[in-house]
Image (spheres, rainbow, N blue to C red):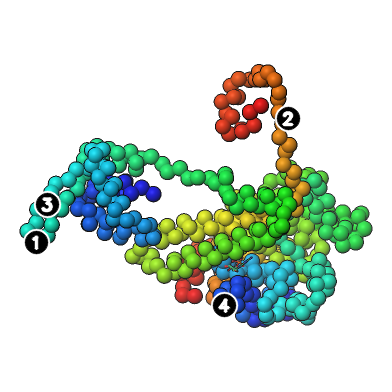
Amino acid sequence: MFILKTESLTKKYGSESQPIYALRDLNMSVEAGEFVAIMGPSGSGKSTALYLMGGLDRPTSGHVWLRDKDITTMNDDALSKVRRESIGFVFQFFNLIPVLTAVENVAMPLILDGVPRPQALERAEAALKQVDLANRASHRPSELSGGQQQRAAIARALAAKPAIILADEPTGNLDSRSSDEVVAVLRRTVDDFGQTLVLVTHDPRVAAHADRIVFIKDGNIVDENRLKGADRAEQIREKLGRVAMSEG
Amino acid sequence: MSVKFTLLALLHQRPMHGYELGKQFSSIMEADWDVKPGQIASTLARMKDGGLVDYEIAESSDAPDRKVYSITDEGRADLELWYRTPEVRDYRLSDTFYIKLVLSILGGPVPPEQVLSAQRRELYQQLHNVTEMLRKTDARKQLPWVLLLESATMHLEADLRWIEMCEAHLPDLKHYTPPKPPPRQRGRPRRHATPERESDGALGGSSEA
Ligand SMILES: Nc1ncnc2c1ncn2[C@@H]1O[C@H](COP(=O)(O)OP(=O)(O)O)[C@@H](O)[C@H]1O
Ligand SMILES: [Mg+2]
């Protein structure tokens, strides 16, 4: 059973006379408890796909199904409710509020959503535990390493118990050690908590942790893979090279 | 971009006449780096005066006589020094887009979100152009050109990443107020307690009283 499905998802930029398709008839579906990585060259439409899946942006045409609901036909209020309740976002830049502690940062969206402060903080602490950051709960972002800040941002996304987490280059701003730390945490939320996760990355070492990799180019899927074996990162690197050079 | 050193490098291979130099020049530089024949001739003349190149007149029965240029020892030394001197990249600490963004944050007719978005569109357009050029290039035959295009891609990606970073920081940036300039000192100039700091005024920029 899918959690999220796109149907001929299309996003057009530019003028009528010179349209640029950021996404063209994208059809993909994500199963419950699945970890899908999206890869592709710069400008191929990865972020656009993720934003549309998360209702952060509206498609030019096509649909996004979140379980049995088509989020593309919802009005702004309904969409924003779905976003808050069912979708967790993680970005390349952590977007933590500098003056708040880690646990306050994680609790913030819940409090804004009307959860009483004590419960919100309790759930925030549980989420921090999930990302191995319980012992840093009262630190401010500036007192955390890059990897720890990103884990706090992941905890913030997890706290609302979303149906799906959408992560756009979550390790894009991290060194390779912090990056390993972050992917390990993400992988564990899938394995131990059944979290569904879609992650955009151009790092083969990160994508190697996914259950399935979708390669996109010029706004459409050009390849799809479940890779096995210890040399997955190498296989992915090779595939990426072939995708980039292929005719559009 | 140095016409002078390109010519010296070509002449280092073998002596050539002006027309040949012009042809070699444009075949190496696939990018549309415009050099006019006049520019090559005037550079050669200047280098001859400076003793970096010399020429012999090649007489020909069926064509006008031509000057065949060759590199001198002095020219060779100059060329070698050029190769060994690293190129310094401009880190764009006075980026014009950045100035535009900061000014838009201070308030104005166009909000910073739209300033960022217009810039992003332009960067994507350029990225598309470079990607298209890359796709049309045969890496086996034109590797140097491919590497140059890859460099352009990487810089554009970095610029796009930076735009994303600015966007992520916009909420914080909006609370930014530029520091007030220190009050102007009147009368007798202040004595600096630490005179050695005076020398780094070029970077600090705030040492003027
Ligand atoms: N704000 C924008 N304005 C204009 N075009 C855009 C904008 N954002 C994205 N695009 C277009 O959509 C394409 C895909 O962008 P994006 O999804 O950000 O790519 P990726 O995340 O794979 O690097 C870009 O190549 C560009 O043509
Ligand atoms: Mg992107």
C-alpha span from label 4 to label 2:
56 Å
Q: Quadrant of the C terminus of chain B?
A: top right
Q: Nearer the viewer, mark 4 or mark 2?
A: 2
Residue A47 x/y as whole percent: 64, 66
Residue B187 x/y as whole percent: 70, 20
Circle 1 SS class: loop
Residue at 25 percent across and 45 percent down: it is B45
Q: Earlier in the sequence, mark 2 or mark 1?
A: 1
Circle 4 SS class: loop
Query: Which class describes the residues within 10 Å of circle 3: few (<14), some (14-19), or many (20+)?
Result: few
Residue at 13 percent across and 49 percent down: it is B57
Label 2 marks a residue whose chain is B
| Residue at the left extreme, as displayed | B61
Residue at the disc numbered 4 = A17
Q: Vertical placement of A156 versus A7: above or below?
A: above
Residue B132 x/y as whole percent: 47, 69
Residue A195 x/y as whole percent: 74, 67
Q: Point out which mark residue B58 bears.
A: 3
Describe residue A246's horizontal placement relative to residue B160 as left or right: left
Which kind of residue does numbered mark 3 sit on? Ala
